Image: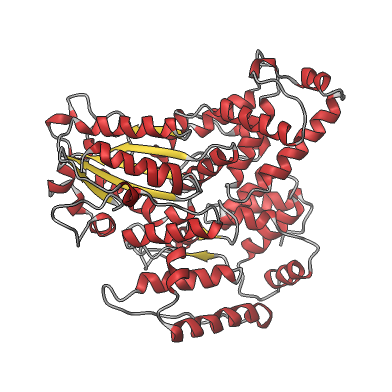
Amino acid sequence: MSPQEWLNVLKSAYLQEFIRRGGSAVKFAVVEEAQDVKTVCIGVGALSREEGFVTIHADSHCTKVQLIDLLYKEMARQIDWDALAFEYVKKLFREHQWKIPERREECCWSSLASLNCCDEAAMHREVNAWLEGSLFQDFHMSREFRLAMIQLCVAQLELPESPSQESAAIKAWLRGELKQMAILKKILIFEKVTRSNARDLIISLAHWTRLLGKPGMVLTIDISAFTGGKEAGATSLKYSPSAVMDAYEMLRQFIDGSDEIEGLLVVVVASQAFLSDQRLGLNRYEALKLRIWDDVRDKTRQNPFAPMVRLTDQTTVFAESSLLAKVGSRKEDVQHQRVIESLRAGVPSPGVVQALGCPQPMVKSKFQQMLQDAQASIHKGWTTKGMLIEGGFGTGKSHLLESLRRMALESRFVCSKVVISKETPLYSPAMMFRSAIEAADIPEKRGDVLTEVAADLNFKSPQYANFYEWVHRQGGEIDGRFAASVFLYERMVNDPELSHRIIRFWAGDPLTDAEIKRLLKSCDASVS
């Protein structure tokens, strides 16, 4: 199949249909000649811009893209954050039937107040209320991303010649260029962009573009530098085998998580060495190969919808009707297409599990009882036993685990999936705990789970009172440092920086006994 034919498929079936309606997909294109990699990337970019998508290109020759935080930073550097924020401000004003100039340079609080015949203070109140209602309560985005976008939107109404320090710091933080976080602490952003939050930021960014009325985001990644070769050039970045494996792992995670992302098309373009290089190619990472390799295929015809296509100079004649993948406007129609995309990659996504059901009714029934026992154990004070599931390769363990995870989330449990590896060994409880916290999902929210849970704490509720009494019970099994941290969080909740430190302590970061005692003394608490 020729590159142009495949681009036509992307345009008609994905950009104009599935992605535009909120779906997401990851596609691999392998070209015969190395010089064609750039041509395909340019073609995808031109199509996406023509269709109104936010378009981003990451080139492994000049930018390190093997880790998700590095990829996100490259994406953020290509985004005009002020332009997107101003688009959203204009959208808000129009929705509330208020007037606003088209040009950013003509906007400031005083001119807008005059234009809408109201005083400046009233306009401040209205805009802040709009932003809080539409952005802060939108849990499809992580908490820190929501806070950053609110501040950027407010900054669009400041005088252009005197931009705020916070606005510049937020954009530097989004791009991964901010050295000191102190300036952002007052707007409750404490963490730099790292591997732990970069994925949530990418998902949040994709959702943000759709809030602006755009159809979504298209990301092209040129990975031809991973396999090196003469075509890479003398100035190209060089990648070690471990760095390439990290990159393949990141791409696998994109495929596995595409069911959770809204309006994102990732197109990965590689040279022929991606398939033939035994040291740095696809064969070195079986998990990615299993998701994109076409085990069963027609030797003479390409499947244009496959996760991976091989692009050549040969022209394949397709009936125009076969290239159309009409997606209905209903939410469930998009979900059905998500299921098809996941099945093409062999991924047991939440949508696939919901569509196919659980293949082990006895395990499902037992797990449902365990969830009920876990809820009852809160009042009874005992711990629910776990479950060990054994099965050979291809027996559906991943499908079953995803099904059980979905059941837990639907029952309002926080759920975490930990993969045992050299980074997360089973013999290290501390590393297991940190990995579980980092990977935890909270129902109907996105971002750091402990931050979201702590933000919803109601100190006056009977549930919290029971929890507090259990934690502080004399002779109990809970470490006194945790009890002290709970007391400090409640007492010092108006100190955002301290609250963040305590949340990070709960997640596994250090907080010494001396620091805890000093903080307790500052609260006038008795210290034994």
Count of labels in the image? 0
Taking the spot 42% from the left edge, 61% from the top edge, the residue there is 339
In the image, 6 versus 429, the foreground residue is 6
In the image, 157 versus 427, the foreground residue is 157
Which corner quadrant of the image does residue 56 belong to?
top left
Residue farthest to the top, as pictured? 161
Compared with 501, 33 (above or below) is above
Residue 301 makes an appearance in the image:
yes
Task: Give the image location of residue 358, x and y in percent.
Answer: 44, 77
Taking the spot 23% from the left edge, 54% from the top edge, the residue there is 285
Task: Give the image location of residue 345, x and y in percent.
Answer: 32, 58
In the image, 429 versus 64, the foreground residue is 64
Name the quadrant of the C terminus: bottom right
Residue 513 makes an appearance in the image:
no
Taking the spot 18% from the left edge, 52% from the top edge, the residue there is 301
Task: Give the image location of residue 83, x and y in percent.
Answer: 57, 26
Name the quadrant of the N terminus: top left
Colour pattern of the rendering: secondary structure
Task: Give the image location of residue 257, x and y in percent.
Answer: 42, 55
Taking the spot 53% from the left edge, 32% from the top edge, the residue there is 173
Q: Is residue 300 left or right of residue 40?
A: left
